[in-house]
Image (spheres, helix red, strand yellow):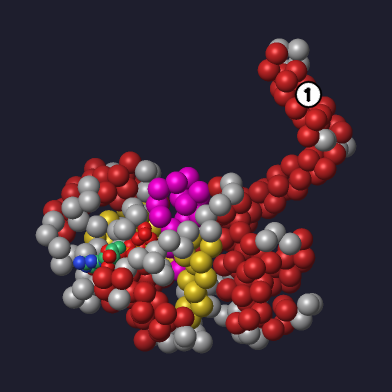
Amino acid sequence: MQNIVQRLLDGDRRALARMITLIESEVPAAHRYLAELHRHAGRAHIIGVTGAPGAGKSTLVTQFVRELRHRQHKVGVVAIDPSSPFTGGALLGDRIRMMELAGDPNVFIRSMASRGSPGGLASSTGDVIRAMGAAGFDPIIIETVGTGQAEVEVMHSAHTVVVVCAPGMGDEIQAIKAGILEIADIFVVSKADKPGADQAAAQLSMLLSLDPNRRKGPWRIPILKTSALKNQGIVEVVDAMRQHLAVLKESGLLAQRAQRQVRSEVQALVLHAVMHALKRRVSEDEWNALIEAITTGERDPYSVARELLEHMGLQMEQT
Ligand SMILES: Nc1nc2c(ncn2[C@@H]2O[C@H](COP(=O)(O)OP(=O)(O)OP(=O)(O)O)[C@@H](O)[C@H]2O)c(=O)[nH]1
Ligand SMILES: [Mg+2]
């Protein structure tokens, strides 16, 4: 088992698949392996693709992968909540194209279920990215539906976030509402062969010009149109992704982002470990009794929290 790390570093796909399974099933050994992999990971360009259900994300991801393969990249894909890659997109034969890609040794596609806590999803996605990066995949594309908090949180591990809006779905506005505006680095109006694409782009442009964030530091957020049907616009989006990465590097933002991410990763691990240790020490019955006592006003949450921490040899600061 120990040499799973070595095999993964040598680019063995089965070792990578096995590692991802270990990550997903939260096997304690996974952290030991990931710690070893850490030194070899972290250089891949992470691209997030998000947007409303049915916006055309999987279709785009498939085309990005093909374009990146033309450019000789070894590409990883993490599709969160795999409803669409294999079930949707039948109209344009995306399913078949995804399958074709899956047979390419320089493409690794993995679906992950969007279950558990938002923090849990973000951290396991981060671990999967680490494993894929160590196996030499770069860039790595993450696809999520941009509706829930968990999905938005996952996008924080991306360097470049592509937000996809389809015309005539009214979802340009919804995307803005869901707080996606702030995280977008590139907007794509998909299905540009359909009526309403120009209006959708104009609408987005208007909304963006109202927003001072339109410029993200040295980066000006572009709005690009694509059509999978006519095979248009993909090269431009892939170019924009690469340019965005270059701007992040030159400006020092990439390094800043990495530091921010490491900080929150370590915090999350500590928090997780503390909660885990607590659950081992306090039985379900004890928990219930404490909660009951707080609810009735017999106890208060502050002293209970203090007591629980002291139970683990930790002092809570006096307030
Ligand atoms: N006309 C047209 N249809 C498209 C285009 N891109 C995607 N579609 C269709 O839109 C539908 C949804 O595409 P997907 O790529 O599965 O969308 P998605 O955003 O991944 O969907 P979920 O993952 O289920 O949220 C499919 O029927 C596609 O064939 C396009 O450029 N033009
Ligand atoms: Mg999809």
Observer able to see residue 302: no
**Amino acid residing under circle 1:** Ala
Quadrant of the rendered image containing residue 58: bottom left
- 199 or 79, which is in the foreground? 79
Residue 172 place in picture, x, y as percent: 25, 49
According to the picture, the residue beneath numbered tag 1 turns out to be 289
Answer with left or right where residue 315 lies relative to residue 145: right
Name the quadrant of the N terminus.
bottom right
Q: Residue at x 81, y 29 (%)?
A: 286
- 227 or 41, which is in the foreground? 227
- 121 or 261, which is in the foreground? 121
The answer to if 147 sits in the magenta stretch is yes
Quadrant of the rendered image containing residue 187: bottom left
Q: Residue at x 79, y 39 (%)?
A: 278
Residue 21 place in picture, x, y as percent: 64, 68
> Magenta residues, as a range?
141-155
Decide: few, some or many residues near mark 1? Use Cα within 10 Å; few <14, some 14-19, many ≥20: few
